[in-house]
Amino acid sequence: MGIQQIEVYTVRLRYREPFRIAPAASTESHNVIVKIVTDYGVVGWGESSPSKRVTGETPETVVRTLDKIAPRLIGECPLRIERDVELMDSIVEGNPAAKACVDMALHDILGKTACKPLFMLIGGYRTEVMTDITLSIKSPREMAKDAVKAVKKGFEALKVKVGVNPAEDVERVKKIREAIGSETELRVDANQGWTVRQAIEVLNKMEKFKIQFAEQPVSAENLGGLKRVRENSPIPIMADESIHSPADALRLIEAEAVDMINIKLMKSGGILKGKKIASVAEAAGVPCMVGCMG
């Protein structure tokens, strides 16, 4: 059995309204779709949602990377996923979002070939998981209204984007908590928007609003700063942009700079390496969340 054909498509998905986080605002997702056809009739699908800010990739670079990878994968066994990922890594360094869509398509083929749900094949057992909804940065009052709408739709956890203005960030969380009550879980995500001093000050002020965790409060490269924030924050610290690989996870855990990890397939290069990050975290007793991009 082998890979017979790989097709690549681009797609634009416009948002209903602009979505703003600390670094920038976006109005659409410009993604890349991969279709892998096998010589035994099974077809796998994967998707790349690149972020120039996080991994340095764009839809154009993803397509160019896939143009290099795809010819070398023709004829390879789609079920030897570790081998296929190693082959991709030998062809092109980095470019995890491009590799992630191929990895996803290979895992899709695995599940379809086995006629089993993929989550069971890779060791999962839960049939239900909690998901949050992310609130785009707006004025405190507008975000409070968005929070109420989300809770009415049934969401039991909200991720609040912050990181633009420390004083306003505290006010945002205050207004949201007042609007939705105490039962709904709140998480905040600064997307590297604060300095170390700002992060420590803001998180201590936010503690009273029952914040479950604070995601990537400072620059991804500032390992020492992240550690200082963790040591001085009453709220657990989650790393996102700081962790792209199993080696990154090990480095931050050993530095005692993180309480939790946000795994994203676009950063890790797909499901295979995302699982390895989870294994590193599990061995250290560090909880993980699976997030998305785009």
Image (tube, rainbow, N blue to C red):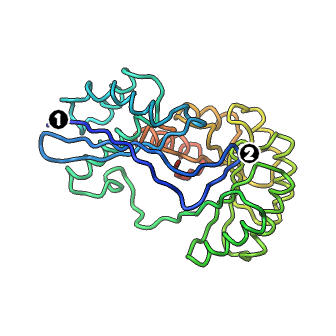
Q: Is residue 294 left or right of residue 66?
A: right
Count of all numbered marks drawn on residues in the image: 2
Q: Is residue 3 left or right of residue 104?
A: left
- Is 13 above or below relative to 252? below
- Is 180 above or below relative to 6? below
Q: Secondary structure at mark 2?
A: loop
Q: Secondary structure at mark 1?
A: strand
Q: Residue at x 81, y 67 (%)?
A: 174
Check disc 1 and report the residue beneath it.
4
Give coordinates of residue 202: x percent, y percent. Answer: 84, 52
Q: Is residue 239 left or right of residue 117?
A: right
Picture quarter with the N terminus? top left
Q: Amino acid at mark 1?
A: Gln
Residue placed most toward the observer, 163 or 145: 145
Q: Residues within 10 Å of mark 2 (few under 14, many from 20)?
A: many
Q: Is residue 38 left or right of residue 84?
A: left
Whichever of labels 1 and 2 marks the residue nearer the N terminus, that label is 1
Check disc 2 and report the residue beneath it.
217
Q: Amino acid at mark 2?
A: Pro
Q: Residues within 10 Å of mark 1 (few under 14, many from 20)?
A: some
Q: Quadrant of residue 283?
A: top right
Residue placed most toward the observer, 142 or 96: 142
Q: Residue at x 71, y 42 (%)?
A: 192
Give coordinates of residue 194: x percent, y percent. Answer: 79, 43
Residue placed most toward the observer, 259 or 66: 66
- Is 40 above or below relative to 177? above
Q: Residue at x 21, y 34 (%)?
A: 77
